[in-house]
Amino acid sequence: ATEAKRIPGWFGAENQGAGIAIADLNNNGRPDLIVLHIDNPSGQNRAYYRIGWNIDTKGNVTGGWSEMKQIPGSFGAENQGAGIAIADLNGNGRPDLIVFHIDNPSGENRGYYRIGFNLDSNGNATNWSEVKPIPGWFGKENQGGGVAIGDINGNGRPDLIVFHIDNPSGENRGYYRIGWNLDANGNATGGWSDVKQVPQWFGWENQGAGIAIANVSNRPRLVVFHIDNPKGENTGYYRISQPLDSKGNVTGQWNEVKPIPGWFGWENQEGDIAIADINSNGRPDLVVFNIDNPKGENSGYYRIVWDIL
């Protein structure tokens, strides 16, 4: 893995969600890094993204960083997770940005997503969809969430995978569901799957989570990330599923939970992962994002775990 690389610019003093995605937005053959954070001031939350241009094969952003771009629309006053994914939903050759967040009102939590359509070569969306509710259970308290996109059922339309960590009393648990066959407007025209549990350990306290899809031999596998928050230093972990069937169920087992090398600090305010072949060797690399929450201003960091499959 690389060392943790600091992301320049403002993150605010309190965050309640983070996301990362990778796409070649400026069409120059090198991937760009899209980074989301939700700012949690007093009052309503706000979401922002920035872009790190032209990642080289060692994982460095060589083209500088964009300014901060605010995402329009409501995010509520309290969030307990967020994530982003990128796909061309409307088939016009320009990427669309899917933004997911978990709202934490009194009572049951809810998941929502919205779409920024047709990102131009500067990473700006031409327009934004309304905020779309995700049906089904999220629990009352979450400690991270994430979103990924891919064609799970092989019918040519993208499917939306939504992940959340439930935080009951006792051990935490991770779950995912799938919204089938997103149309050009980003609506799940095929309905939603049941909520599926991710087996194995998540610990008692988490401070960030994410999900990504690794396609190996054209068969999608899930990669699930969480930040464990024990007493003392935090640690990030990931696990990889065996390939999914066309209904989104894991065929066989999940691989063991593996620690991510390097520093995560003592307190995080969310994190996320993305998958891309950064070093161009034909194998998937894991890009890990976390927001450090010391006293004072927060800071964002990313690192790359090479060749996870």
Image: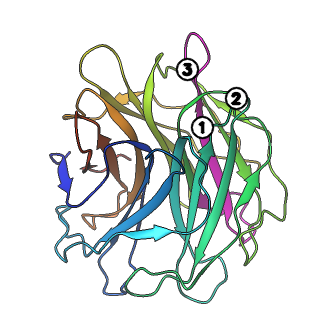
In the rendered view, does 42 fall on the left or right side of 189?
A: left
Q: Which corner quadrant of the image does residue 60 belong to?
A: bottom left
Q: Does the image show residue 213?
A: no
Pick whichever of labels 3 and 1 is earlier in the sequence.
1
Residue sitting at x 29%, y 75%? 66
Question: Which quadrant would residue 110 be assigned to in this image?
Answer: top right
Q: Where is residue 209 in the image (x, y as percent from the top left)?
A: 47, 38
Sequence-first disc among 2 and 1: 2
Three-letter residue code for mark 2: Gly
Which residue has dot 1 on it?
164
Is 56 in front, or is 117? Answer: 117
Q: Can residue 180 be found in the magenta stretch?
A: no
Q: Vertical placement of 93 versus 299: above or below?
A: below
Q: Give the number of callouts.
A: 3
N-terminal-most mark, 3 or 2? 2
Residue positioned 43% across, 62% down in the render: 48
Residue 88 picture quarter: bottom right
Front of the two marks 2 and 1 = 2
User: For numbered disc 3, what is the local secondary structure?
Assistant: loop
Image quarter in which the N terminus is found: top left
Residue on which the image places disc 3: 172
Give amino acid for label 1. Answer: His
Residue at x-position 45% and y-position 87%: 120
Q: Name the residue under label 2.
A: 139
Q: In this view, does 238 lie to the left or right of 125?
A: left
C-alpha span from label 2 to label 1? 9 Å
Highlighted magenta segment, given as a residue range: 149-173
- Whether tag 2 and tag 1 are in contact, CB under 8 A, the answer is yes
- Using a 10 Å C-alpha cutoff, classify the residue at mark 2 as few (fewer than 14 neighbours), some (14 to 19) or many (20 or more): some
Q: Is label 3 in contact with label 2 (beta carbons under 8 Å)?
A: no
Label 1: how many Cα within 10 Å (few below 14, some 14–19, many 20+):
many
